[in-house]
Each structure stands twice: as structure tokens, then as C-alpha cells.
Amino acid sequence: MTNLSQVKKVSFDSIVTPTTVEQFRDNLKKYYFTLTNPETNRTGLVIRGGQEVYIDEISSLDDVYKKTKSGWNGSGEPFEFSPLCYISKEGMDYIQESFPAVIQATKDTMNDPERTTIVEVSSNEKLTKDLNKINFKLIWVKSDNQIWRSFFVKTLGEFSGYLD
């Protein structure tokens, strides 16, 4: 495991699935790209396009859809955010070749540290600098992406809107 001041690599199995809104909010801060406003000390989930949704104002991903006016609450398009998880090209190829068993293939890939890097954040103060130190690549993922649903369910539980 690589440990920096704010970031450490973790295994998929070590992630605790939230059962309360508070745990859901904590996991958003740990496993998704967020920024904290130093003046207000409020943390926002970063949405592609420059929008932020304050974590203390949401209790599920459905609230993010409402606040971003996406999905059924507006544009019809899913919002995009950045999980702190990177799947290698080999891992993505394996998942796509496993169709229609995508869910199991995704779980297998997420549990393989050779194909997947998951980081947990304790503070986002120097997040981008720490991610660069471990050559971690941020990617944008649509909130309805089937390949990523296992990660959404594991990290956000029932608050993701998906079932395992």
C-alpha cells in the first residue's frame, strides 16, 4: 500500500458499504473527487463541467441528479463525476469481453490490484498533488455507467440508487 499525507491505496474488499446517510457522505469524500472550500469548510462533489454539489446537502445520488438538473430531473443525461478508482486497459478489456456477465467481471477486476487502483482520501487539501505522486489518473464516469455500478454500490450502498 502506498501512503501519502492524504491518499492511500486500498482494496475493493476493504471498502465498507454505507448503511447511513452520514456514512454515504463520508464515502463520497473518501472515494470520489471532492474539493473543500477553505472559507466555508464545506466539501463539494465535483461534477464534470465545473459544477460542485455540497455533500452536506445530499442524502443520495438522486439528490445530485436534482441539484444538477440531470437525469429525469432535467436534461435526461446522467451527470459525470470522478471515482478515485482507475481500471487499467487490461481490466476494461476483460470486463467488456465478459459480456453479458459484466457485473461479476467488474467485481473480479475491482478485486485485482494488478488491474485496478483504488485510493481512499483522508483529506482533499493536497489531493491532486498526492494523486500525481502515485501517477493516478482521474477519469470522468457517467452516473449510469453499467461497468462502474459495482463500485457505486460498494462505496455508496443503497444511496447510489442501484442494487447489487
Image: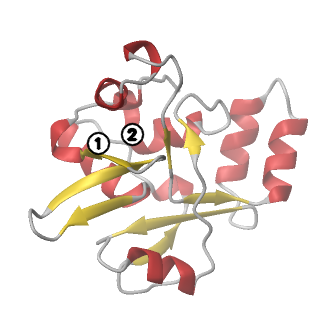
Q: Secondary structure at mark 2?
A: helix
Rendered position, 23 above or below 2 = above
Give yes or no for contact between labels 1 and 2 (Cβ–Cβ under 8 Å).
Answer: yes
Judging from the image, the colouring scheme is secondary structure
Q: Position of residue 162 (x, y in %)?
A: 48, 24
Please, what is the three-letter code of the amino acid marked with disc 2? Answer: Leu
What residue is pinned by disc 2? 156
Which of the 4 quarters of the picture holds residue 20? top left
Residue ID at (79%, 53%): 91
Q: Residues within 10 Å of mark 2 (few under 14, many from 20)?
A: many
Q: Position of residue 36 (x, y in %)?
A: 23, 64
Asked if residue 33 lies left or right of residue 112, the reply is left
Please, what is the three-letter code of the amino acid marked with disc 1? Answer: Phe
Q: Secondary structure at mark 1?
A: helix
Along the line of sight, the residue nearer the viewer: 76 or 124: 76
Q: Which mark is residue 24?
A: 1
